[in-house]
Image: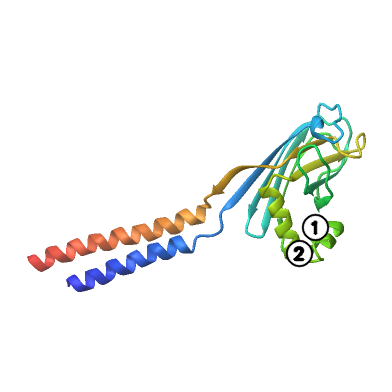
Amino acid sequence: MRTRSRIRLAMASAIVSLTFAGLPAQAQVFVGQLSGSQEVPPVVSPGTGTATVTLNGNFMTVDVVFANLLGNSNAAHIHCCAPIGANAGIATPLLTFPVGVTSGSFSQVFDMALSFNYSPGFLLANGGNALQARNTLFAGFANGTTYFNLHTSQFPGGEIRGQLLQQSSVVPEPISMVLLGTGLAGLGALRRRRRHDGDDSSA
């Protein structure tokens, strides 16, 4: 009876270990506070906004809110790779970004393993290879050289811009917590079973 309990306990420990090993990739979050003063050269605009980019595996989620633009929005992009105060080419065009408005929001998930999620110039600069383009872009996020730029009718070069800076190293995914909880619950149940088996054998 005790041998079987030890086997069960070992199996439960293995389950917990595999749960940790099999957790999905953790997300990295980058945020840019948007303003005209960050444009290069700076522009005078009451426009404000926030761009949040979440990287998780091959996927890039872009969430943007903006308001009080002087011109109507006509394009938005993620640029790479340049530090604050410098310009860089377009890495990813946000083709479904709302146009013709002065306030609004945007949210979309991009699979960065797909070539069409890069500008032709950025893809060409990375050998026409989506994997290489992804690595370059994600490295740009990591070293703080990506930025979001919102172009308008009044400021074709960009009315508000923000450098995308890392806010959180890791964000545990809900599914990770579920898997971990399941493994620990199994371990606890088998420990209780072990105590119960011990009581039965001594009765």
Q: Residues within 10 Å of mark 2 (few under 14, many from 20)?
A: many
Give yes or no for contact between labels 2 and 1 (Cβ–Cβ under 8 Å): yes
Residue bearing mark 2? 130
Residue 13 found in image quarter: bottom left
Give the number of marks.
2
Percent coordinates x, y for residue 145 in the rendering: 73, 45
* Three-letter residue code for mark 2: Ala
Percent coordinates x, y for residue 132 in the rendering: 74, 63
The answer to whether 117 appears left or right of 200 in the picture is right
Percent coordinates x, y for residue 68 in the rendering: 81, 29
* Precedes in sequence: disc 2 or disc 1: 1
What residue appears at the point 81 percent right and 26 percent down from the top-left corner? 46
Pick the residue in front: 35 or 68: 35
Indicate whether 73 appears above or below 42.
below
Q: Quadrant of the N terminus?
A: bottom left
Residue 82 found in image quarter: top right
Residue 17 found in image quarter: bottom left
What residue appears at the point 83 percent right and 31 percent down from the top-left corner? 69
The Cα atoms of the two marked residues, 2 and 1, are separated by 8 Å
Indicate whether 49 appears above or below 182.
above
Residue bearing mark 1? 118
Q: Secondary structure at mark 1?
A: loop
What residue appears at the point 82 percent right and 31 percent down from the top-left corner? 36
Q: Residues within 10 Å of mark 1 (few under 14, many from 20)?
A: many
Indicate whether 25 appears above or below 80.
below
Percent coordinates x, y for residue 84 in the rendering: 76, 38
Query: Looking at the image, what colour scheme do you see?
Result: rainbow
* Three-letter residue code for mark 1: Tyr
Q: Quadrant of the C terminus?
A: bottom left
Pick the residue in front: 146 or 14: 146
Q: Which mark is residue 178?
A: none
